């Protein structure tokens, strides 16, 4: 038997996952990665520290790159595969969870419901400008007393002649204070309806939530509606039930299953580089057994989670991915990404708490990602109901 030589696995792609991607997917992934490395990474630590983000410039840039609503067809959208959208999400969140949130809220939570449930006029009016980043959107579902139970929302809309009068409030709304339009879900006599609410509507306010200790490179707001009058053609005609907002959440959760592995990868790669350079007891700490175990555990987690996300992407593109399977990805990849971030912080020691490195920023962000778009507990119960056939929600 002849000897066969194999190349040493790449520490950044140990299982050669790139071999599972098409040339087009690699090109798209590398384009987003290059943008993040050049335009996001040098500045995002400062944005996070200052609690701000250049949202208008980023939206325009992402629009030029074709990333806003990229997985939607027509109306100026790129029409990529779901997998391509997921790969872009990995690279964006390798920069910062707030950056990925800006893109995913725009595409999956604001543009998607208009694309899926809107009238042709609504689609033509809003989607091309949103795809270019000229109009920023947000998604109003969560309320202060209705987080994991959105069906108990109090925001309501009532008919008044040919108009609607919207009252209530929403909480923890990404992009809220900078959005040009909000897609707001409200209780009506006809069921749960979606409304396109321009931010300059009289009675609409969007105060920014300050003093956050997580997702600081992201705008988070409260939305309030005090007798906001909306014409009937600002209502999404295609849905009148919780199916509308829940379908949007599935879109966003899918991107998170990918994106969390971007944050985890950034933490792992930072820890690996640091451990090879940091000298203690006259040798790099990467030579110590306990440190190598930490590095290996992180690498295995990132590779395994990326393969899971890629598998979900392929299933989505084949039209056979269920909401419960999306929950699997969000549930497992986010909790594991958080473990990677915490482990990487320990490898960096005291340096792990500074914004000179991205690890603590990712760790803090992931605490929020662990909770939003469905808490870890809610996804547990969704999968539990799926495998047992029994409802444990109430």
Image (spheres, helix red, strand yellow):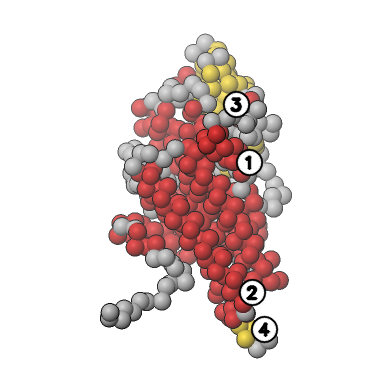
Image vertical order of residue 246 relative to residue 190, above or below: below
Describe residue 298's horizontal placement relative to residue 3 as left or right.
Answer: right
x%, y% of residue 173? 60, 39
Rate crowding at label 3 as few (under 14), some (14 to 19) or many (20 or more) other CA atoms within 10 Å: some
Is residue 46 in view from this perspective? no
Find numbered disc 2 in the image and state the secondary structure of the residue it sits on. Answer: helix
Q: Residue at x 43, y 32 (%)?
A: 114
First in sequence, mark 3 or 1: give its number.
3
In three-dimensional space, the C-alpha distance between marks 2 and 3, rounded to whole angstroms, equals 48 Å
Q: Which of marks 2 and 4 is in front?
A: 2
* Quadrant where the image shows the C terminus: top right
The residue lying furthest to the top in this view is 161
**Disc marking residue 58:** none
The numbered mark at residue 290 is: 2
Q: Which of marks 1 and 4 is in front?
A: 1
**Disc 2 from disc 4: Cα separation:** 14 Å
Q: What x and y, as percent, mark residue 68?
A: 42, 46
Q: In which quarter of the image is residue 16?
A: bottom left
On the image, numbered disc 4 is attached to which residue? Answer: 280
Question: How packed is label 1: few (under 14 Cα within 10 Å), some, or many (20 or more)?
Answer: few
Near-viewer residue (47 or 284): 284
Task: Compute the Cα span from label 4 to label 3.
Answer: 56 Å
The residue tagged with tag 4: helix, strand or loop?
A: strand
For label 3, the residue is 151
**Label 2: few (<14), some (14–19) or many (≥20) C-alpha neighbours in 10 Å:** few
Mark 4 or mark 1, which is nearer the start of the sequence? 4
Above or below for 130 versus 57 = above
């Amino acid at each position: 038997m002849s000897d066969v030589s194999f190349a040493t696995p790449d520490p950044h792609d140990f299982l050669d996952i790139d071999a599972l991607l098409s040339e087009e997917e690699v090109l798209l992934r590398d384009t987003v990665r290059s943008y993040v490395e050049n335009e996001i990474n040098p500045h995002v630590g400062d944005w996070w520290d200052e609690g701000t983000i250049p949202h208008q410039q980023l939206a325009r840039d992402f629009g030029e790159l074709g990333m806003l609503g990229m997985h939607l067809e027509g109306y100026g959208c790129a029409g990529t595969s779901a997998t391509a959208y997921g790969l872009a999400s990995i690279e964006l969140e390798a920069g910062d969870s707030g950056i990925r949130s800006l893109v995913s809220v725009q595409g999956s939570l604001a543009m998607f419901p208009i694309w899926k449930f809107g009238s042709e006029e609504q689609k033509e009016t809003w989607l091309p400008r949103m795809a270019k980043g000229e109009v920023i959107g947000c998604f109003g579902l969560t309320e202060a007393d209705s987080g994991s139970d959105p069906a108990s929302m109090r925001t309501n809309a009532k008919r008044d002649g040919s108009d609607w009068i919207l009252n209530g409030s929403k909480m923890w709304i990404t992009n809220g204070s900078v959005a040009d339009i909000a897609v707001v879900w409200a209780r009506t006599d006809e069921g749960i309806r979606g409304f396109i609410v321009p931010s300059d509507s009289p009675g609409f306010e969007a105060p920014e939530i300050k003093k956050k200790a997580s997702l600081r490179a992201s705008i988070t707001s409260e939305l309030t509606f005090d007798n906001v009058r909306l014409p009937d053609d600002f209502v999404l005609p295609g849905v009148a039930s919780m199916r509308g907002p829940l379908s949007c959440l599935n879109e966003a959760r899918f991107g998170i299953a990918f994106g969390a592995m971007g944050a985890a990868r950034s933490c792992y790669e930072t820890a690996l580089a640091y451990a090879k350079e940091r000298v203690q007891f006259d040798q790099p700490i990467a030579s110590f057994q306990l440190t190598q175990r930490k590095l290996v555990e992180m690498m295995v987690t990132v590779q395994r989670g990326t393969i899971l996300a890629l598998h979900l992407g392929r299933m989505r593109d084949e039209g056979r991915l269920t909401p419960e399977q999306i929950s699997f990805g969000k549930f497992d990849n986010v909790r594991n990404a958080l473990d990677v971030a915490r482990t990487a912080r320990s490898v960096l020691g005291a340096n792990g708490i500074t914004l000179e490195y991205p690890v603590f920023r990712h760790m803090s962000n992931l605490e929020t990602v662990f909770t939003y778009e469905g808490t870890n507990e809610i996804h547990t119960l969704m999968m539990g109901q799926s495998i047992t056939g029994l409802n444990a929600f109430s």
